[in-house]
């Protein structure tokens, strides 16, 4: 029985990572690299600049697509997958999750002895409570 919490293909989830990646990372990096290439006036610098900007843009678009395509939390019989903006997708084994606490919009639990904190700001109260019950049932 797999359950999903959070919306798939929700463009509102893209606002924070889009702002941070594009405005704080991609645009300043691109401007800096273009000025370096213009200052050096070599073909090698222009090729390196084009390759660097392409890689940074590709990684940004790939991460934004993952945030857009996957829901916040997916729970299976044996795994819990969390997809938060600005982070990679994380997968936890349900058998190894202990000490589940829900404090307002934050889910806290221990996985393999390590504390994990998941922001649930986009979930409704009913979804948060159901998520907490499902995780506690696995204990």
Image (cartoon, rainbow, N blue to C red):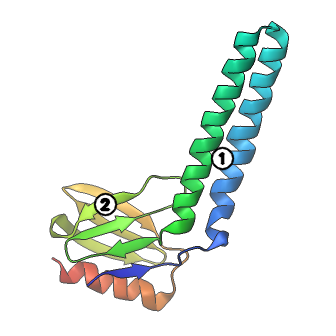
Q: Residue 21 got which mark? A: 1
Residue at horizontal 25 percent and vertical 69 percent from the top: 79
Report whether 21 appears left or right of 83: right
Vertical arrangement, residue 22 with respect to residue 66, above or below: above
Q: Residue at x 66, y 59 (%)?
A: 16
Q: How far apart are marks 1 and 2 (CA)?
A: 23 Å
Q: Which mark is residue 91?
A: 2
Q: Quadrant of residue 55?
A: top right
**Foreground residue among 95 and 45:** 45
Residue drawn at x 78%, y 16% is 37
Q: Say left or right for 96 vs 35.
A: left
Can you say which quadrant of the picture contains the N terminus? bottom left
Among the 4 quarters of the image, the one containing residue 31: top right
Give coordinates of residue 125: x percent, y percent.
48, 88
Q: Give the answer, above or below, for where 88 lies relative to 138.
A: above
Q: In what element is the residue under mark 2?
A: strand
């Amino acid at each position: 029985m797999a359950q999903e919490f959070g919306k798939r293909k929700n463009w509102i989830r893209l606002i924070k990572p889009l702002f941070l990646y594009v405005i704080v990372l991609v645009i300043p990096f691109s401007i800096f690299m273009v000025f370096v290439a213009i200052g050096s006036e070599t073909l090698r610098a222009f090729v390196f600049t084009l390759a660097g900007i392409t890689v940074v843009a590709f990684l940004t678009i790939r991460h934004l697509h993952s945030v857009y395509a996957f829901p916040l939390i997916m729970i299976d019989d044996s795994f819990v997958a969390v997809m938060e903006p600005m982070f990679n997708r994380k997968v936890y084994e349900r058998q190894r999750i202990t000490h589940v606490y829900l404090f307002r919009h934050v889910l806290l639990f221990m996985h393999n002895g390590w504390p994990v904190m998941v922001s649930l700001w986009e979930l409704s109260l009913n979804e948060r409570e159901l998520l907490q019950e499902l995780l506690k049932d696995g204990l």
